[in-house]
Image (cartoon, grey):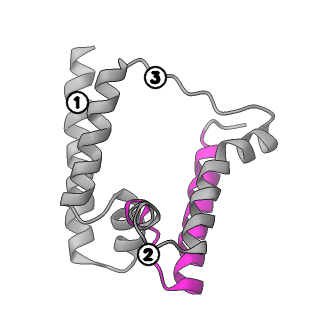
Amino acid sequence: MSPYWPSLFGGMLLGLACILLFLFNGRIAGISGIMGRMLGRERRLADLAFLAGLLAGPYLYAAAFGRLPTITIIAPWPLIIIAGLLVGFGTRMGSGCTSGHGIMGLARFSRRSIAATATFLMTGIVAATITGAMS
């Protein structure tokens, strides 16, 4: 089996989940917005179900492929924590995350989402180039 099939299948499932959430609830599947509502006062059953599906993903993968996905993290914990805080800050500053802008926003031809996604991609390319050159 090609190593790309699980990722392709996962991407299709994510796209399907975004479409269904939008069609049946009129909501954008932006994880930062969903988490913000869940941590705040506004909790919706659809948001809880969407997050439960994300958390169940690795276990569904294990059921389909007989093992949990292999994840290797070589960065030290302080760096991971700082990176997580920076992602959270950037998400709030950019009014959304990659799923909200990159999946839903691009599908709706949102100019703000096009600009945000271009920024995400360029920043990722620069970061990968710099860290790739350092290792």
Instruction: Identify the element where label 2 is drawn.
Output: loop
100 to the left or right of 114? right
8 to the left or right of 32? right
Residue type beneath disc 3: Ile
Residue 73 is marked as: 3
Q: CA distance from mark 3 to mark 2?
A: 30 Å
Work out which quarter of the rendered image holds the C terminus and state it: top left
Residue type beneath disc 1: Thr
Asked if residue 3 is among those painted magenta in the image, a careful observer would answer: no
Asked if residue 11 is among those painted magenta in the image, a careful observer would answer: yes
Image position, residue 94 (x, y; %): 21, 61
Image marks 3 and 2: residues in contact by CB distance under 8 Å? no
Q: Which residue is mark 2?
A: 28
Work out which quarter of the rendered image holds the N terminus and state it: top right
Q: CA distance from mark 2 to mark 1?
A: 32 Å
In the image, which residues are magenta?
A: 4-33
Q: Which residue is mark 1?
A: 129
- Residue drawn at x 19%, y 26% is 130
Name which of mark 3 and mark 1 comes first in the sequence.
3
